[in-house]
Image: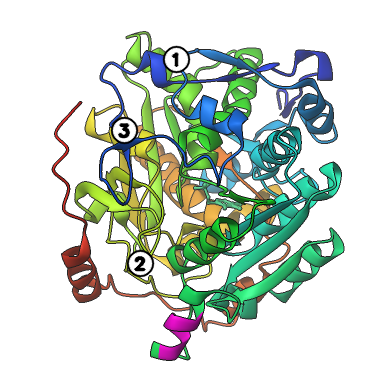
Amino acid sequence: MEQTKYILTEKEMPTTWYNILPDLPKPLPPLLHPGTKEPTILPPPLFPAGMRDQEFSKERYIEIPEEVQDIYKLWRPTPLIRAYRLEKALDTPAKIFYKYEGVSPAGSHKLNTAVAQAYYAKKDGMKRFATETGAGQWGSALSMGCAFFGLECKVYMVKVSYNQKPYRRILMETWGAKCVASPSQDTEIGRKILAEDPNSPGSLGIAISEAIEDAFGREDTYYSIGSVINSVLLHQTIIGQEAKMQMEKAGLYPDIIVGCIGGGSNFAGTYLPFVKDKIEGKQPKLRIINVEPAACPSVTKGPYAWDYGDVAGMAPIAKMYTLGHTFIPPGIHAGGLRYHGMAPIICHLHQLGFVEAKAVPQVATFEAGVQFARTEGIIPAPEPNHGIRVAIDEALACKKSGESKTILIALSGHGHFDLGAYDEYLSGRLQDYDYPEEKVKEALTHLPEVKYVGA
Ligand SMILES: *Cc1c(COP(=O)(O)O)cnc(C)c1O
């Protein structure tokens, strides 16, 4: 066996984030103000100045503040690992690698942006964050980020996940945050939704509305989002920059990069530094496959349209693939993938043909996750199981064709808090959900009317 693990030293850790915006062959459509429907910035009362500057920055490389770098070094650089045992089990000539973000204290990539956001909020003299969380990974990451910078943290957690994953709430509370099930009684929008449907399972769109309402209502509070927006994808590019250096050490360049997309941050963070090569014509054959759940397939089934980021229509309007901001996805276990829209950068790259997308059903993703656990040891979170599913399918295709492709998987986090989901799978109770076509059709009738026709 050749080398298994490709490690970088602390000194080799990138000191800048990579901003794709200046390298896009066509400019990214702007965000539109939810009221005026004219181009806008990230709303100043909600976001740190540091992030507002980054959101539409033209600078290609943006300095990572030293305090943030120092915290990153608690778990970064993260390892790139060659999945020899999985390759052997699949009997494939493909070379499979995974970049593992589960080594972070919160168990996922989300700390990369949580720490940065807490740093920028503290710098502005803010005292508190309000945020939403799906499966709880984002809430726990931000809770830890806030603990490190002495900020309070209030987390609105999607109710279905709140009930499925109590340990995530306990993590948040251990790091000092307050966590409530969303829809909650703590906000006007939460009370309104509960009045209409006391059994609402919640959705990321609803939880976002609650957190935004909370932050709008208090001067000492910023709103924080763990995915979707440009600055968050930017913070995650540390993953891809490291992975690129590590693939170089392995003497290989990926033919396929595959990962899961919920709002798109872990996977875009992994592939944006590689997309740069494709845009520049250096790697025309590189395939980048965004994988989403068949139950919430925004990129593969949704129209490319202007839509609100949240249920209540308080968040800016973005041009994205969307299932409609009022769409409430089925309660799949990959809570982090239950979002109606998608990062505008990913949607734009898809429109331009630089990346592709696939949707996979839930049971097949757990089958892949279990095979991964039994060969590589790591029990992946339900979200990255989506990427692993497609990686295994591609590796099996290589077996048929005899091609020895290099496949890079974005392994965004571990599944230690998702064992209830594994239990359902192992005991044969886990089910697939049909694509909720009628519900999506209905939700798409609520897209905002936008007259903006600029770039
Ligand atoms: C939140 C989460 C996701 C989905 O969010 P993205 O912004 O698309 O990365 C995927 N994997 C893990 C482990 C997560 O915690």
> In this image, 452 relative to 129: left or right?
left
In the structure shown, which secondary structural element does the residue marked by tag 3 occupy? loop
Residue at position x 60%, y 64% from top? 135
Residue at position x 29%, y 49% from top? 299
Which quarter of the figure is the C terminus placed in?
A: top left
**Distance from label 2 to label 3 (Cα)?**
28 Å
Residue type (three-letter) at the residue carrying disc 1: Lys
Establish if 366 lies above or below 448.
below
Residue type (three-letter) at the residue carrying disc 2: Ala
Q: Mark 3 highlights which residue?
A: 30
The answer to if 193 sits in the magenta stretch is yes
Residue 423: tell me if it is visible.
no
Depth check: 34 or 233 in front? 34
> In this image, 74 relative to 304: left or right?
right
In the structure shown, which secondary structural element does the residue marked by tag 2 occupy? loop
Q: Mark 2 highlights which residue?
A: 295
In the structure shown, which secondary structural element does the residue marked by tag 1 occupy? loop
**Which dot marks residue 58?**
1
Q: Select label 2 or label 3 by which is in front.
A: 3
Residue 358: tell me if it is visible.
yes
Residue type (three-letter) at the residue carrying disc 3: Pro
Range covered by the magenta-colored residues: 191-195
Where residue 32 appears, x then y in whole percent? 31, 41
- Main SS, magenta residues: helix
Establish if 3 lies above or below 395.
above
Pointers 1 and 2 in contact (C-beta within 8 Å): no
Depth check: 361 or 169 in front? 169
**Distance from label 1 to label 3 (Cα)?**
14 Å
Where residue 94 appears, x then y in whole percent? 48, 32
